[in-house]
Amino acid sequence: MAEALSIPQRGAKLLRAAIIAGALVLSGCQSVVPRGPRTGPPPPPRVVQEQPQQVQPGIPVDVARHRVALLVPLTGSNAGVGQSLANATQLALLDTKNEKVRITTYDTNGGAAAAAQRALAEGNKLILGPLLGEDVRVVTPIARRAGVPVISFSNDVTAAGNGAYLMGYAPAQAIGRVVDYAKGRGVTDFAGLVPNGTFGERASTAFLRSVESAGGQVRSLQTYGRTPGAITSAITRLAQNAPFGAVLIADSGATAATAAPLIRRNGGATAHILGTDQWNLETSIAGRPTLNGAWFASVSDELYRHYAAKYRARFGAAPYRLSSLGYDSVLLTVRIARDWPVGSPFPEARLRDPGGFVGIDGPFRFGRDSVAERALEVQEIRAGATVVVSPAPTGF
């Protein structure tokens, strides 16, 4: 049968023509179905299998901007200052109109190590923060293994180094500045009151070194606890070495305001009261009449006042004084980002620029100890206000 169905090509064409013609003649009588080869349906269109799009976990990779992590407490007891720092970084990005830096905030209250690991897993090349010295010590080795520098807001100088840079206000610098100013005003004999604990130990060391460097003499240095009457007893001991030209009170403005009248009644009637930069964090410091005439050193407030007004207008509340550290850390990042290729490691060597950087708090630069060296001014509390009696240097 296979041979019977085999028809030469030319014959097949004639046969088909004849069948069609016959069909036309007989169409009025019957339907004729041609018996020639049938043409099948057209082949379906070719389906191109598309490769499924790869979805990366976490935040998508940003190829146009630098990924920078901000590690601050957003919950817990330090949430207020942490949120203020976060707001300050966003305000700095808006003010600089920078589109090359992207900042993602991570809450350290649930654990600084976990926050750092998440930040690194999501591709951040620089860490701003954390706030606390103990958190810096946890985060630094994690970030170091990834080759990512840490620019912290802590003032705990023992946490600096190994890739961690501290922007916090170091008390030793403020103590040295106010001691130099007092020496320049004729003070040669000093005394000091410092609280027990780590801060007091560091303040004591800084005070002794500063007075020696200035060519003065420490006649008495007394410590005290936080129990009732402790500071009164310390002042009594201090009086045994009177007279002295100035007394450093390395504590809060409230404690200093309580201690000052006792000092004046116990051999220090004409002694100048000296404070630390901690006083500049207290908005009510100028309103303490017992501190009238006291001197303390700190970063300049001139630019900070403009920043604070802008902050209040945008966020509806006053900023924490420490929030300027967040703002200035972004200014530093934006400056370096001009020559920092997106996706490449952060150029850590640029942090050692001897010319330093300029921010709301004035000029600063990182020394060999990785702690921010700052240009400080000296203020005097005078009739309910603070008056600059020695302006901050304009550079290094």
Image (spheres, rainbow, N blue to C red):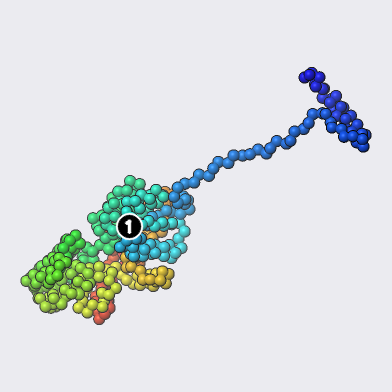
Q: At label 1, which amino acid type do we have?
A: Asn
**For the view shown, which residue lies furthest in the front direction?**
30
Image point 22% across, 69% down: which residue? Answer: 252
Q: Could you say where residue 159 lies in the image, as x and y percent from the top left? A: 26, 55
Q: Could you say where residue 22 lies in the image, as x and y percent from the top left? A: 91, 31
Q: Could you say where residue 298 lies in the image, as x and y percent from the top left? A: 27, 68
Image point 48% across, 53% down: which residue? Answer: 64
Few, some or many residues within 10 Å of mark 1 (<14, 14–19, 20+): some
Q: Is residue 188 visible?
A: no
Quadrant location of residue 334? bottom left
Vertical placement of 321 versus 370: above or below? below
**For the view shown, which residue lies furthest in the bottom direction?**
383
For residue 373, side relative to residue 190 (left or right): right
Image point 45% across, 56% down: which residue? Answer: 100
Image point 26% across, 76% down: which residue? Answer: 286
Quadrant position of the N terminus in the picture: top right
